[in-house]
Amino acid sequence: MNRIEKKFSQLKAENKKGLVTFITAGDPDAEKSLSVLKSLPESGADFIEIGMPFTDPMADGPAIQASSLRALEKGMSLKGVLSMVRDFRESNAETPIILMGYFNPIYCYGTEDFMNDAKEAGADGLIIVDLPPEEDEELRVPAEKAGLDLIKLVTPTTHDERLKRVIEHASGFLYYVSITGVTGTKSADIDAVGQHIAKIKTQTDLPVAVGFGIKTPEDAANMSKIADAVVVGSSIVQNIEQNQDDSNLNDRISEQINALKTAI
């Protein structure tokens, strides 16, 4: 099993739900971002999504958009993202890392080169939010060859036929987008999400993680009742922004992650 499969298997055996945490690589700067990254597993993160900064992150709300700009202004690049992953792997060989972002930077890097370099660095999967399944072969095939999971997005508007297409080449887990809109802007209707996830579970054995709109420990606790994992991003990124000049930044983030993990 790869790291993602192993972690979900472990959580299931322990009758626990997973916590997926998101940070933007290089925010507020490379050194602090790496330090926060290394602190996440001990604080309670089961999986880590690392945002690859992009100039036009159209699926993201104001908080993550701003974090991308801060990171880019400090010189973060795809090579810098992979360097962070390598540094993380020097002390942590277990926690799954998923790289999340947009296709344009990967295309410019060279898709096959990026997949090989990401795998060599220690990444386990990818979430590319702007590449629909009808157009993903250019990314999917090199990812499969490199041994990286390609995690697909499912939304409240994904109908049955579309869901079959999305699931067809998905691996790792499914990321259920609990709201229509961008990250960090609204809260989800848990009953509606629960009904949709139940339907998804009849068509796939892949775990389902719910993200978008989960901000507080209470949000996380509620969503963990209907999903295999919950994803928290914007509120962590906001915490980083608010405390970026605090010498105890890692403690501030650790307190937040611990509260989320405890809640689920």
Image (spheres, rainbow, N blue to C red):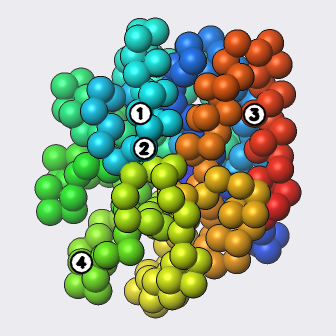
Q: Which mark is residue 253?
A: 3
Q: Which residue is mark 4?
A: 162
Counting residues from the start of the chain, the first of labels 2 and 4 encountered is 2
Counting residues from the start of the chain, the first of labels 3 and 1 encountered is 1
Q: Which mark is residue 61?
A: 2
Where residue 246 appears, as percent x and y from the top left, is 76, 15
Which residue is painted at 70% across and 72% down in the image?
222
Which residue is painted at 61% across and 50% down in the image?
232
**Residue type for callout 1:** Gln
**Location of residue 65 by image quarter:** top left
Counting residues from the start of the chain, the first of labels 4 and 3 encountered is 4
Q: Image height check: is 219 above or below 86?
A: below
Viewer-nearest of labels 4 and 3? 3
Categorize mark 1 by other alpha carbons within 10 Å: few (<14), some (14-19), many (20+).
Answer: many
**Residue type for callout 3:** Ile
**Location of residue 136 by image quarter:** bottom left
Tell whether label 1 touches label 2 (CB within 8 Å).
yes
**Residue type for callout 2:** Gly
> Is 91 placed left or right of 104 in the picture?
right
**Residue type for callout 4:** Arg
SS category of the residue bearing label 3:
helix
